Amino acid sequence: MDKFVIRGGNPLVGTIRVSGAKNAALPAMAASILTEEPVILENIPDVRDIETERRLLVSMGAEVELGYGRAHHRTTLCCRKLVNPEAAYELVKTMRASTLVLGPLVARMGRARVSLPGGCAIGARPIDLHIKGLEALGARITQDHGYIEASAERLKGGSIFFDKITVTGTEDLMMAAVLAEGETVMENCACEPEVSDLAALLNKMGARIQGAGTPTIRIQGVDKLHGARHRIIPDRIEAGTFVIAGALTGGDLMVAHCEPAHLGALLEKLQQCGVNIRTNGDSVRVIGEGPFAACDMATQEFPGFPTDMQAQYMALATQAEGISIITENIFENRFMHAQELVRMGANIRVEGPRAIVRGKTPLSGAAVQCSDLRASASLVIAALVADGETILDRVYHIDRGYERIEEKLRSVGAQIRRIGEMFPRRAAAS
Ligand code: EPZ
């Protein structure tokens, strides 16, 4: 299992490039199920979850070509001959977003067998709202041996109200409704930029979707979709991670190829903390001068403060003067990083959905363990400012969603290296 060895103390200086968004690329790849024609996606991040999605689609009979060299970050998908509408437990257990194939499979094939994802480090994360929505579109759903079986001759347009705002739930049912008979109205939808990006792709494929990015989405079903070419939006969470790293290391960092408008709540909060930030076109410049002031923060659905930036913000709060109260409103168990930060010298007390962080406390290098994707990013940031050497174990978590983070950070001055076998290169496209 790979580890990172990080020696703290170096300011990050220079330009760091943001990759495409994992959470936009995954639903976009699933959307290719909805047509027999090729779908070409650009700006696909080279991360482990994309490889899992490729294997999932290939296991159904799809042809998926992940680009190399000049075509790196471009993917061509063709689901002309889907033979096995199933998402097996072996794949779903490694990546919950595999459940995003449920809606497209029922819409295109009339049936789907998808493993229930099971528990997750950050919370229970059920998919009951996906199922309820599919039933509202006329699907018959049974559960058997850990699998959801869904079927429908043709889905029928209907109205869906989400009891809770769900990102992949909105995406899954949007993909189901585009081939349904008649109109579907979805309310209390997620407004994340990734949802809008998926709708943009689907509309290029011939779908008729209005209102994506707002709480109410209207979808006029069509009989057939065609192929399309689409560029995936930049990864706002990767961009946010680098902005906080730049601020904390006292550097002068240009985070480029991102979409500052997608980072609104985060940048506003960081400016409240006294971080010097300038946005310009597709980049954010952060000049880490310090000291930073402690500010309370509560995670919310977009356009609120993203839960996927909570852990990284906690690392900043350990270096801010005063008490920061961090409230996690989206997931019930998303403070696994807190105890690892305490091992590095932070002063954090977790009380249910709140973490009370007292700063500023000096951090010292230690052996720490990654527990999930964003917790890992928080530990990398803390290690960049800690005294001495930190050894991060289980970095396979970070490889799931950050493209070669150690190379990117080293290119702007970080002392970070990977030990162990680099995550296995993608098997030659089979
Ligand atoms: C997406 O997960 C992201 N993943 C997550 O990013 C992100 O943390 C999350 O949205 C919130 O922003 C992808 O897009 C692939 P939800 P998702 O459904 O869709 C509850 C990362 O680090 N809920 O919006 O699975 C759920 O338990 C990952 O990149 C139900 O109760 O999250 C949670 O409390 C981690 N029933 C809340 O809703 C359902 O059927 C929001 O979850 C669905 C969700």
Image (cartoon, grey):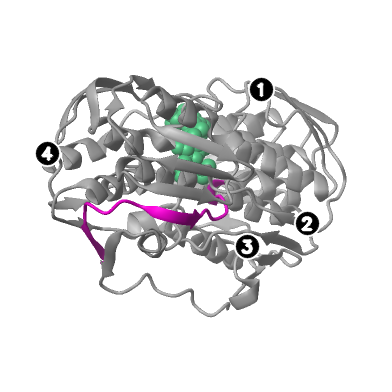
Q: Which residues are magenta?
A: 1-23
Residue under pointer 1: 215
Circles 2 and 1, Cβ within 8 Å, touching? The answer is: no
For the question of whether residue 123 can be seen, the reply is no
User: Which numbered disc, 4 or 3, marks the residue closer to the eye?
Assistant: 4
Q: Amino acid at mark 1?
A: Pro
Badge 2: residue crowd in 10 Å (few <14, some 14–19, many ≥20):
some
Give the distance between the C-alpha atoms of the residues marked 3 and 2, in whole angstroms. Answer: 15 Å
Query: N-terminal of the two: label 3 or label 1?
Result: 3
User: Which numbered disc, 3 or 1, marks the residue closer to the eye?
Assistant: 1
Secondary structure under tag 1 reads: loop
**Image: 18 above or below 158:** below
Give the distance between the C-alpha atoms of the residues marked 4 and 3, in whole angstroms. Answer: 51 Å
User: Which numbered disc, 3 or 2, marks the residue closer to the eye?
Assistant: 2
User: Relative to the observer, which residue lies in front, 324 or 336?
Assistant: 324
- For the point 68% across and 43% down, the residue is 197
For the question of whether residue 271 can be seen, the reply is yes
User: Relative to the observer, which residue lies in front, 419 or 186?
Assistant: 419
Give the distance between the C-alpha atoms of the residues marked 2 and 1, in whole angstroms. Answer: 27 Å
User: Which numbered disc, 2 or 1, marks the residue closer to the eye?
Assistant: 1
Magenta span contains residue 14: yes
Query: N-terminal of the two: label 2 or label 1?
Result: 2
Query: N-terminal of the two: label 4 or label 3?
Result: 3
Residue under pointer 4: 345
Q: Which mark is residue 84?
A: 3
Magenta span contains residue 5: yes
Give the distance between the C-alpha atoms of the residues marked 3 and 1, in whole angstroms. Answer: 34 Å
Q: Which mark is residue 35?
A: 2
Give the distance between the C-alpha atoms of the residues marked 4 and 2, in whole angstroms. Answer: 53 Å
